[in-house]
């Protein structure tokens, strides 16, 4: 309103007409101050060097590694996010205790946000494949062996792909039933076996540890549970492979195939292209409210289709949108029904149970799959029941229904003292269409700024960097745009420490250029000679220049 009145006042001056009577009760500066105050109350004060906070999703392994959380706070984490859809309350307690015990270099404490799981639609189970793992050498483009494969034998109860060694090979861990057999191995010793195909193979021991040994594999070997490993004729020189993980199988889906979502959650048989693919759907309400002609997206938008028919037990859809060559549909993948009016609440029975823990431990609770004002009202009632009205409420906007109801959702949420909005761009992009995501997130940010409600910019921020250690050019630009929000969320990944540090640097640099939608027109130094450097050397070469 202040913006509209500002334009009208200028027009009145230019035309000589009488000024318009002011209706706005909050001006530009006051609105900016209110938003900043609300952001501080919900998310904690921002660092000195930037105005946007950094939220980081805490992975399961951090429950037993306080040093990880310490490092992330040192690099710039301001808010720790704990996802109630994973792990247990014991693990959550460890994560939160670690985070609360550490303060940043400028004395700020880390805020705690906890996500409620919500009524997430997922595909049901598929029959598991055999317990087998393949160990293979590294080959050149012509198929010739360049380096032998590596297998580590230990008494561990699982199999896993370990980090790659410097030459590009992955070490495959294989459990054995007899730990003493491992300890008796010698360097250069040969391990004889017949793999699952009956092929004779011979491995060479090249490294020995206290409870594990590593061997080289010259030819591809398929290892199964119970396979016999021998280093001699005596019984003491023979052991068997322990319990391997089951191979995860999937439907192979192509354009024009039909997928049948079933109410039954019995493990389905994986099928190939050209036939109907049966798989369970975890949300029973979908079978009551879905209608023919509505869209369905599976696995974060990788597979799209149109519903052909609906019965009490099945939803049959025809695949109309999929990449050339098809895609694999696995168990536990997300299902989005953007056109379906699902008559279900955002709070599940598990969410209500989790709130007992959240109310006593979190600074804010993130409400997943909110659709209607009554969802927010129900959460407020539960927080009042638990005497936890001081816990902030963050609305996760991730469905078409939530976006269309945003004004009503905000007005209902603003009955609580601490309110925020998370733009959950993963599911939201699937629901509204990737081509519309940019304009939708802009509208959400504008509405929230008008309501003086802080925004959390979430999903796939510096995702490639967090997963691989190297960012893409597009995601660096996306991270720079995220500075207009009050908080930016990073998801977990093996290189999350570097992602936090990079995001901190980007947000710090952008803070001088942009404030919400306003360009600050900061003086640029890129073409000025840097102090202490030869004439003609631009200022950006100097590390001391911000």
Image: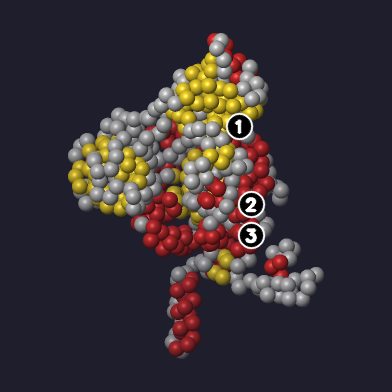
Residue 194, x across and y down, in percent: 46, 23
Residue 375, x across and y down, in percent: 38, 45
Residue neighbourhood size for the residue with mark 3, other residues' Cα within 10 Å, grouped as few (<14), some (14–19), many (≥20): many
Q: Residue furthest right?
A: 532
User: At 61% from the left edge and 32% from the top edge, which residue is drawn?
Assistant: 64
Query: Circle 2 — which element?
Result: helix
Structural distance between the alpha carbons of marks 1 and 2: 22 Å
Q: Where does label 2 land, which residue?
A: 501
Q: Is residue 139 left or right of residue 186?
A: left
User: At 49% from the left edge and 76% from the top edge, which residue is drawn?
Assistant: 6
User: At 27% from the left edge and 52% from the top edge, which residue is drawn?
Assistant: 320
1 and 2 marks in contact (CB < 8 Å): no
Structural distance between the alpha carbons of marks 2 and 3: 11 Å
For marks 1 and 2, the one nearer the N-term is 1
Asked if 128 appears above or below 289 in the picture, the reply is above
The way the protein has been coloured in the rendering is: secondary structure
Query: Circle 3 — which element?
Result: helix
Q: Quadrant of residue 49?
A: bottom right
Q: Where does label 3 land, which residue?
A: 508
Observer-nearest residue: 236 or 231? 231
User: At 40% from the left edge and 53% from the top edge, which residue is drawn?
Assistant: 428
Observer-nearest residue: 344 or 176? 176
> Where residue 64 is drawn, which disc sits there?
1
Asked if 531 appears above or below 390 in the picture, the reply is below
> Where residue 403 is drawn, which disc sits there?
none
Q: Is residue 109 visible?
A: no
Query: Circle 1 — which element?
Result: helix
Q: Is residue 322 visible?
A: yes
């Amino acid at each position: 309103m202040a913006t509209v009145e500002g334009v009208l006042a200028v027009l009145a001056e230019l035309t000589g007409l009488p000024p318009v009577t002011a209706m706005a009760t909050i001006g530009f500066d006051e609105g900016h101050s209110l938003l900043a105050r609300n952001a501080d109350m919900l998310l904690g004060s921002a660092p000195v060097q930037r105005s946007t906070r950094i939220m980081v999703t805490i992975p399961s392994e951090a429950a037993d590694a306080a040093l990880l959380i310490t490092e992330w706070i040192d690099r710039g984490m301001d808010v720790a996010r704990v996802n109630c859809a994973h792990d247990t309350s014991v693990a959550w307690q460890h994560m939160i205790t670690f985070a609360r015990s550490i303060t940043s270099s400028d004395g700020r404490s880390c805020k705690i946000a906890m996500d409620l799981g919500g009524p997430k639609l997922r595909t049901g189970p598929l029959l598991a494949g055999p317990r087998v793992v393949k160990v293979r050498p590294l080959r050149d483009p012509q198929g010739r062996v360049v380096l032998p494969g590596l297998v580590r034998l230990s008494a561990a109860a699982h199999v896993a792909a370990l980090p790659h060694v410097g030459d590009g090979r992955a070490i495959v861990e294989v459990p054995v039933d007899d730990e003493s057999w491992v300890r008796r191995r010698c360097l250069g010793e040969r391990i004889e076996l017949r793999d699952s195909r009956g092929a004779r193979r011979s491995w060479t021991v090249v490294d020995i540890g206290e409870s594990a040994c590593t061997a080289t594999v010259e030819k591809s070997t398929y290892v199964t549970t119970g396979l016999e490993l021998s280093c001699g004729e005596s019984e003491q020189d023979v052991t068997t492979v322990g319990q391997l993980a089951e191979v995860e199988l999937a439907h192979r889906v192509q354009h024009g195939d039909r997928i049948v979502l079933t109410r039954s959650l019995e493990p389905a048989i994986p099928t190939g292209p050209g036939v109907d693919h049966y798989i369970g759907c975890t949300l029973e309400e979908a079978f009551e409210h879905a209608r023919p002609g509505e869209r369905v997206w599976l696995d974060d938008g990788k597979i799209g289709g149109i519903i052909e028919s609906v019965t009490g037990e099945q939803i049959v859809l025809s695949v109309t949108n999929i990449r050339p060559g098809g895609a694999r549909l696995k168990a536990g993948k997300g299902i989005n029904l953007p056109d379906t009016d699902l008559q279900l609440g955002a709070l599940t029975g598990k969410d209500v149970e989790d709130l007992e823990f959240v109310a006593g431990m979190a600074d804010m609770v993130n409400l997943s799959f909110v659709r209607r004002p009554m969802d927010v009202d129900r959460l407020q009632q539960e927080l009042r029941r638990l005497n936890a009205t001081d816990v902030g409420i963050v609305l996760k906007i991730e469905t078409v229904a939530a976006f269309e109801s945003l004004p009503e959702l905000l007005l209902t949420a603003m009955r609580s003292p601490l309110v925020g909005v998370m733009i959950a761009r993963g599911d939201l992009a699937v629901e509204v269409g990737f081509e519309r995501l940019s304009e939708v997130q802009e509208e959400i940010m504008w509405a929230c700024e008008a309501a003086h409600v802080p925004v959390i910019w979430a999903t796939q921020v510096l995702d490639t960097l967090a997963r691989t250690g190297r960012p893409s050019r597009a995601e660096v630009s996306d991270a720079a745009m995220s500075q207009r929000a009050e908080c930016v969320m990073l998801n977990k990944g093996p290189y999350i420490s570097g992602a936090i540090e990079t995001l901190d640097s980007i947000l710090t640099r952008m803070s001088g250029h942009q404030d919400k939608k306003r360009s600050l027109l900061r003086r640029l130094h890129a073409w000025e000679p840097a102090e202490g450097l030869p004439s003609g050397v631009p200022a950006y070469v100097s590390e001391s220049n911000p």
